[in-house]
Image (cartoon, rainbow, N blue to C red):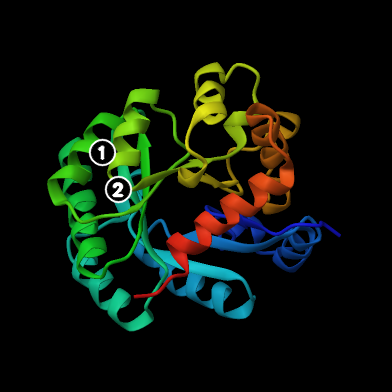
Amino acid sequence: MASFKLFDSHSHLDAPEFELDRCEVISRAEAEGVNQQLLPAVEFASWSNLKEVCQRYAGLYPAYGLHPMYLASHLPEHIPALQNWIETEKPNAVGECGLDFFVEGLDAELQRFYFIEQLKLAREFELPVVVHARHAVEEVIASIKKIGGLKGVIHSYSGSEEQARQLFNLGFSLGIGGPITYDRAKRLRRLVASMPIEFLLLETDSPDQPNADYRGQRNEPARLLDVLKIVAELRSESEEVIAKATTGNAETMFLNKH
């Protein structure tokens, strides 16, 4: 058994990829010390199943939102539906939401509408927001500044060190996962080696973004340990120190209810 506790700050354990062996996946995670996970939603239709999964297993915490890559399934009425859902279910965060200017065919203006509306809900309910920002970090920062009064995490961070500093000043953390395990991730590795540890969260994005040793395979939360090892090496700190700090960061962000 692992000697320390880890918090996977971004896991889609409710996804269909885990339907047949979710119990075993959770057991493997717990054996590696991953006993807490935040599960962000991606579309309106997934909220009910996500809620059930989080209720069924200890240590799983829900976040509800509308992901930009699922734009085709979003409707304007899903925003008031999300407001009602947050009021009723009292989740641990709003998201996954954000902007994706990498995938072709995703209407930018429509993305902006859903993102801004979800930022407003996060502010209204004083909840952290889980943000997807791909080829869109600069505009995400501008949007966060525009709405104001927010806190949260930029999941799978891929921006610059200067953009990271702006996010720290806004009270935002960076989610670091599978990409850090690739040797070619030079810029990200430099950033993680030197960034303030209080803004660092570990994540897997399961079933996506597998680590370098598992490329092409389904990712799962147990592999957060691989991310921890690389981050500890990069920072020349012990795995125990990183585990304690990042777990504390995640607990402070997602479990401290107002």
The percent position of residue 32, horizontal first and vertical second, equals 78, 55
Contact, CB < 8 Å: mark 2 with mark 1?
A: no
Instruction: Check disc 2 and report the residue beneath it.
Output: 71
Whether 12 is drawn above or below 80: the answer is above
Q: Quadrant of residue 106?
A: top left
Of the residues shown, which amino acid type is indicated by label 1?
Answer: Val
Tag 1 residue: 140
Q: Is residue 79 above or below residue 246?
A: below
Specify which label sits upstream in the sequence, 2 or 1: 2
Foreground pick, 193 / 222: 193
User: For numbered disc 2, what is the local secondary structure?
Assistant: helix
Q: Position of residue 236 (x, y in %)?
A: 68, 29
Q: Which mark is residue 253?
A: none
Residue 54 as seen in the image, left or right of residue 127: right
Q: Could you tell me how many numbered marks the image carries?
A: 2
Tag 2: amino acid = Leu
Q: Secondary structure at mark 1?
A: helix
Whether residue 199 sits left or right of residue 240 in the image: it is: left
Is residue 160 visible in the rendered structure shown here?
no
Q: Is residue 177 above or below residue 120?
A: above
Q: Position of residue 117 (x, y in %)?
A: 18, 57
Residue toward you, 77 or 9: 9
Residue drawn at x 66%, y 50% is 243
Residue, x 61% and y 48% (percent of image)?
207
Crowding near pointer 1: few (<14 within 10 Å), some, many (20+)?
many
